[in-house]
Amino acid sequence: MPWKQIVARGFGIADCIFAVHPSDKQDAKAAIAAAKAAGASFEDFEKEMVWHIYKQVTATGMLQDHIAKQVATAKKMW
């Protein structure tokens, strides 16, 4: 499966938080490893994260802050 398709697995289903739950963290690590193995940059990975969050977070005024927090988590893991 292409790495872009597994990025979403690193997010919680109900809260859309990246790598906070143990199973999501394991999936996030796998997605990062797959992206790196495919030669993707962090910016490529970030784009996929943002797209996933954009589709999931619909609360007014929450999107930008939520994206910033989740991308920061991924950057630490990268």
Image (cartoon, rainbow, N blue to C red):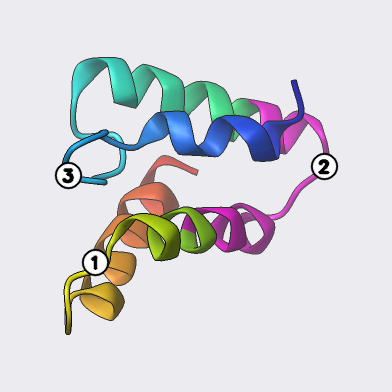
Callout 3 environment at 10 Å: few (<14), some (14 to 19), or many (20+)?
few
- The three-letter code of the residue at mark 1 reads His
- The three-letter code of the residue at mark 2 reads Gly
Residue 10 percent coordinates (x, y): 40, 32
Residue furthest out toward the bottom: 61
Spatial distance from mark 2 to mark 1, Cα to Cα? 27 Å
Residue numbers of the magenta segment: 34-49
Dominant SS in magenta? helix
Asked if residue 64 is among those painted magenta in the image, a careful observer would answer no
Residue 60 percent coordinates (x, y): 17, 81
- The three-letter code of the residue at mark 3 reads Asp
Residue 27, above or below 17: above
List the residue tagged with mark 3.
15
Number of on-image labels: 3
List the residue tagged with mark 2.
39
Of callouts 2 and 3, the N-terminal one: 3
- Residue contact between numbered discs 2 and 1, judged by CB atoms under 8 Å: no
Quarter assignment of residue 38: top right
Residue 46, above or below 58: above
Spatial distance from mark 1 to mark 3, Cα to Cα? 10 Å
Of callouts 2 and 1, the N-terminal one: 2
Residue 6 percent coordinates (x, y): 58, 30
- Residue contact between numbered discs 2 and 3, judged by CB atoms under 8 Å: no
Q: Secondary structure at mark 1?
A: helix
Q: Secondary structure at mark 2?
A: loop
Looking at the image, is mark 2 or mark 3 nearer the viewer?
A: 3
Left or right: where 20 falls relative to 5: left
List the residue tagged with mark 1.
66
Residue 63, above or below 46: below
Q: Which mark is residue 6?
A: none
Residue 59, above or below 8: below
